[in-house]
Every structure is written in structure tokens, then in C-alpha cells.
Amino acid sequence: MINKNSPIPIYHQLLEYIKTKITSGEYPADELIPSEREFSEKFQISRMTVRQALNNLVQDGFVYRQKGKGTFVSRQKVEKKISRLNSYTEEMIERGLKPSSKLIEFEITYSDPTLASILKINESDSIYRIKRVRLADSKPMSIESIFVPCDIAPNLSKSILEKSFYDYVISNIPDPIQYADQSIQARLATESEAKLLEIPINSPVLSIDRTTYLRSGKVLEHELTVYRADRYKLVHSLSRNE
């Protein structure tokens, strides 16, 4: 409740009140929360104070606004630990979400010079070109474009890619996954990306370019992934060498 005699600003008390309702599940994801007028009347505070609390919640990603409709609870962002080499399936299961994939493209083709250099193969070598939309609880989270040398995974199929590629690798390739190099950038979604991710065009996305290596030094895959910025936050632990 709001204590008007407290040294804590009223807008911040309201902000914490709403956050508690969200984290407890009383205000579920994608559900409309009370309006500025309703909060104002409930706690006998000004609508400007309510607006300040809601603005802060929007900035922190707890709620979002839809013009003409009101303020809604945001879905919890998934923390992606960029210092760990986990599969998408592992990440979602760890967070209690149900992972699934929608296969958009699957073909065998020849590598171009750029990909041949990245994958450490010859230009004439065959590669799998794969594109998937990754979902959590049936909601689109990211788009993956993957390039895999055919010699590395000769039995790769559509049915495998509708599940976990890493599970297939662990079970079928004796050369274990060792490490990956990756780069990250923030940008705006293209029209085609926005359609697949079910977000407005020019919405912010996180783009990760990653090359994964096996213990032998061979390249397993080169992956370009576009994540919804409203559903992901990147987490990384840093240490200081003395």
C-alpha cells in the first residue's frame, strides 16, 4: 500500500507495488493492468505521480503500452548467459519454458568463398543451409540461420532440426563441442525478421554472429541469430585479474 508519510517517493512506492503484483503473477503476462485513473482513485494520488511510476516500469521492461488500449504486463525476459555455450533447448528448459522450432529453410548447397573461409572447408564442399524460428511456449523468440559442413553431420535431417541440433551432435559426433567465437550487436528488425518474430518493423533486436568449434579444431557450424530484444537480456560475469 501507499504510505504518504514515508520518505520514499510515492511514485516509487506505486512502482514497487505494481512490480510485486507482476512478479507474484497477480498481474499475468500480456494482461491489462489498471489505468492511471484507477490507480489515482485507488490510492488518492495524482495521475502525474501514477504516470511517472508507469513510465519507469516501461523503461525497465516490466510493462508496455498499446495506443488506445492501455498498459500491459511484459513477458519476462530470458537471460542469455553469453559466457556459456548452451543450446537454445537447454536455455529454455532451465527457465521452465517449452522450446520448439519452426523450420523455414533446409537445403544442401555449395559453400561460397566467405563461408568456406569461416567453416575451414573448400569452396566446392557441400554445406547445409538452415533457417529456423525458435519458440518458447509457442511464442517466437529468435531466428537462426545456420551453416554446417555436410562432412561434419552427414545424416542431418529436417526431423532432427525440429528438435535440438546440439542433442544430435552430442549423440552422433564423437568429436565434442569445445568453444565458440561470437560477436554481438544491437540493431533494428528488417521487414522479414519482424514478420517471423511477430514484432513491428524496426523493433530493436539483438544480433549474434557465432562460430562453434569441435575439440579437433574443426568448425561445427556458423550461426547468425536474431533475438527479440523485448524477450532477451544478455548476462555475462566479469572478473578482474590482479
Image (cartoon, helix red, strand yellow):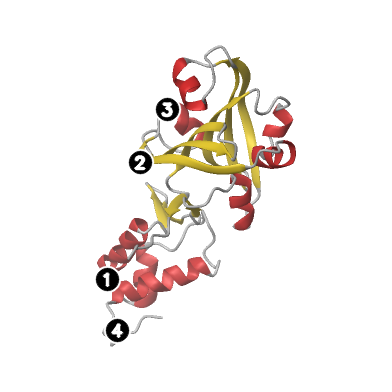
**First in sequence: mark 3 vs mark 2:** 2
Asked if the residues shown at circle 3 and circle 2 are in contact, with their CB atoms under 8 angstroms apart, the answer is no
Task: For mark 4, give the secondary structure.
Answer: loop
Query: Callout 3: few (<14), some (14-19), or many (20+) C-alpha neighbours within 10 Å?
Result: few
Query: Callout 2: few (<14), some (14-19), or many (20+) C-alpha neighbours within 10 Å?
Result: few
**First in sequence: mark 2 vs mark 1:** 1
Give the quadrant of the N terminus.
bottom left
Residue 171 picture location, percent across and down: 74, 41
Three-letter amino acid code of the residue under disc 2 = Ala
Location of residue 203 by image quarter: top left
Residue 217 picture location, percent across and down: 55, 35
Mark 1 sits on what residue? 46
Q: Nearer the viewer, residue 166 or 136?
A: 166
Task: For mark 1, give the secondary structure.
Answer: loop
Query: Callout 1: few (<14), some (14-19), or many (20+) C-alpha neighbours within 10 Å?
Result: some
Mark 3 sits on what residue? 191
Residue 125 picture location, percent across and down: 59, 15
- Which residue is found at the position 29% from the left and 76% from the top? 10
Asked if the residues shown at circle 4 and circle 3 are in contact, with their CB atoms under 8 angstroms apart, the answer is no
Q: Nearer the viewer, residue 196 or 152?
A: 152
Q: CA distance from mark 4 to mark 3?
A: 48 Å
Asked if the residues shown at circle 1 and circle 3 are in contact, with their CB atoms under 8 angstroms apart, the answer is no
Asked if the residues shown at circle 2 and circle 4 are in contact, with their CB atoms under 8 angstroms apart, the answer is no
Identify the disc placed on residue 223: none
Identify the disc placed on residue 4: 4
- Which residue is found at the position 55% from the left and 37% from the top? 213
Three-letter amino acid code of the residue under disc 3 = Glu
Three-letter amino acid code of the residue under disc 4 = Lys
Disc 4 versus disc 3: nearer the observer: 3
Asked if the residues shown at circle 2 and circle 1 are in contact, with their CB atoms under 8 angstroms apart, the answer is no
